Amino acid sequence: MIMDAQETYISRRQDRFRKAPLDGQALKTLIYAGLTWLRTNQETVNALNVYPVPDGDTGVNMVLTMQAAYDEIADSPEQNFGKMIHVVAHGALMGARGNSGVILSQIWRGLARGSDEIEVLDGRSLVSAFAEARDTAYKGVVRPVEGTILTVAKDVASAAENILVETDDPIRILDHVVGEADESVERTPDLLDVLKKAGVVDAGGKGLFFILEGMLRYINGQPLDTPLVTVQPLSEMVLEDTLKTIEPGQEFEVVVDFRPDNPLDLKEFYSDLEEMGTSIQVGEGEGLYRMHIHLLTEKLYEPIEYTRSLGTVIKASMENLVEQMDEIESRARRSQVDVSPVEKDQIAVIAVSPGYGISLVFASLGVAGIVEGGQTMNPSTEDIMNAFENLPTNKVVILPNNKNIIMAAKSAAELTVKNVAVIPTRTIPQGLAAMLRLIPDGDFDRVVEEMNQALEEVHSGQITTAIRNVEIDNVEVQEGQIIALLDGKLVCSAHSLEEASLDLLVKAEADQYELVTLFFGADISKQDANQIADTIRAAYPNLEVELQDGGQPHYQFILSIE
Amino acid sequence: MTGETTPIGSIHVSPRAVATIAYQAALESYGVVGLASKNLITDLTNVLVKDPTQGVEVHYDGENIIIDMYIVIEYGTRIKSVASSVANTVKFHVEKALGMPVNQVNVHVSGLRISSFD
């Protein structure tokens, strides 16, 4: 019954959309819908990376590419479909970020090329535009890898061609294409082995699917601001970011873990939750469900009562969002770090830091500027340049402190007129070791050489939680396990932080060294960190063990072994 | 180059072998439509023999591995993004195969291929 009502609703919405011509302005709205839906599901796309460390940024890159495309047309009054889509393609090209962004921009270019003379889009031209998009996308590479966004673009084009015999209504074509794109994404692990091994689908393909689906959802009158009825694996639920989306009036955050008595009807479950509040997320792992919601004080107990009616509630927690927001704001105020002033002709060091505590340590060592960034939020070339362009000296050293940021640091060095050296530090400990060699009034080349040499003298350990099952370097990792990396290489997986820390130190041959500094991250309490430091002290009585509040995300510990 | 000693002898990997890995990796990178030789004479010989390392130069000075890639990019893609993803892909694949860090990958965009104008 409910299904029927929904179908009627959707078909009525589609009819309404059909009344207006599919011209440039309609395209603008659809692009905006695709962008919005992609952004809503950005985290889902980011989570689809094949390495067990959280470093996925495909979602971010695709959103930025689409945003650039939309910005180009946001104020345009253009009526002509063909002209408008060319502007979209231009914007996507200019804003293309990352590999997936480049491919996405080629897809837009193909769609634009296929719609050259089109004033108002019809079904037949939509189908040929999809075909042109596929051809253009494939032209961009000599040896196309199947099981990627390319495959999805190809399947979309064939799906469009196939349905053309049944209908030439562009909305019905889009409807069909979205369903096929979904299936095509699900098939990507069969075509690409790395995806299968990591147990994920292709991130770029999934992103393309979200863009198309967002357009369809808009036409169907479905909301674009709550993530889909998909259930994520428990370990992938990112609840930290939910605070960013607090709507005015939502005062409490409630998280309930429960085990339903009967299989959950997700559609119904979601729509019941939507009546209570916003920012809904649902996760599942081995029959245990976790739901997250933001709501008003007077509805505080509703989600708990509701889940009790479905099964057994195992744990419920609630937090006052208003208080939390105040806390976050005051923390942001505190995170202003005082950096050292530099004088003319002195060497200024700019360090990239993932957390407040680490920034403080860098500041105490005398850096002239700090750029925030790390594993999942790489600063842009511009962010890095801004940190040193206005300093009164021409001698600048950059410590990227992450392998993914070295590139941006190097382009910053190329773009400026200043004399900039990038020390390729891949970890925080390397950055700190290099920093200790700084002589602000020393000879630039000499200091840079010294700093480079320092990298060899320190070993870096990182401890984090695996976000999926994988096997790399002969280490088998289960989702949710604690894993340790030594100098960027996965060396062990363990069931506890303690076990991982000790195993890492064994692999690093810590008994050959003198000092271990533990930077504990934002996800771990000082007490827990202290306990682990004590365990290490007990195991290595000759080693000096220091504990520092690093405040970095994702990594429970960053270790410097020297 | 890249010697390693084992109890029963040593292992040498030639720059040419490294170049082959880099060449394959580049061809799978999106936006790259080919690799270009540095000069005309090698270009002419390539007509006769298909070289699996064309457009790749590998330098090893006993310590650092430096790779130079001469690539042709599809017209209409963002050159900067393509080039940086080539550098990352090549570095990743060579390091994976070799187990040694690659110090530099320099990407030279030798030309653009224009399949069709917009």
Image (cartoon, rainbow, N blue to C red):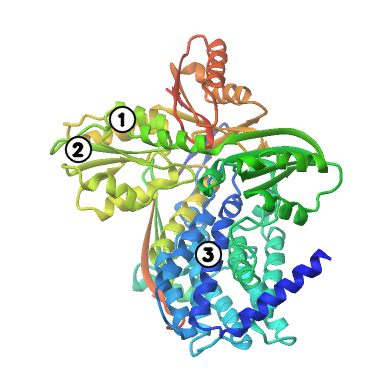
- Closer to us: A437 or A7: A7
Kind of residue at badge 3: Leu
- Closer to us: A183 or A193: A183
* Quarter of the figure that contains the C terminus of chain A: top left
Kind of residue at badge 1: Ala
Asked whether the viewer can see residue A21, the reply is: yes
Viewed as shown, does residue B24 lie left or right of A409? right
Q: Which mark is residue A444?
A: 2
- Residue A185 position (above or below residue A491): below
What residue sits 41% from the left and 42% below the top? A373
Q: For mark 1, does the 10 Å Cα neighbourhood hold few (<14), some (14 to 19), or many (20 or more) residues?
A: some
Residue A189: x and y in percent read: 69, 58
Judging from the image, mark 2 belongs to the subunit labelled A
Q: Quadrant of residue A73?
A: bottom left
Circle 2: element type: helix
Residue A390: x and y in percent read: 20, 46
Viewed as shown, does residue A275 lie left or right of A552? right
Q: CA distance from mark 3 to mark 1?
A: 39 Å
- Closer to us: A195 or A46: A46
In the picture of the structure, the residue carrying the numbered disc 1 is A363
In the picture of the structure, the residue carrying the numbered disc 3 is A35
Q: Nearer the viewer, mark 3 or mark 2?
A: 3
Q: CA distance from mark 2 to mark 1?
A: 20 Å
Q: Earlier in the sequence, mark 3 or mark 2?
A: 3
Q: For mark 2, does the 10 Å Cα neighbourhood hold few (<14), some (14 to 19), or many (20 or more) residues?
A: many
Circle 3: element type: helix
Q: Nearer the viewer, mark 3 or mark 1?
A: 3
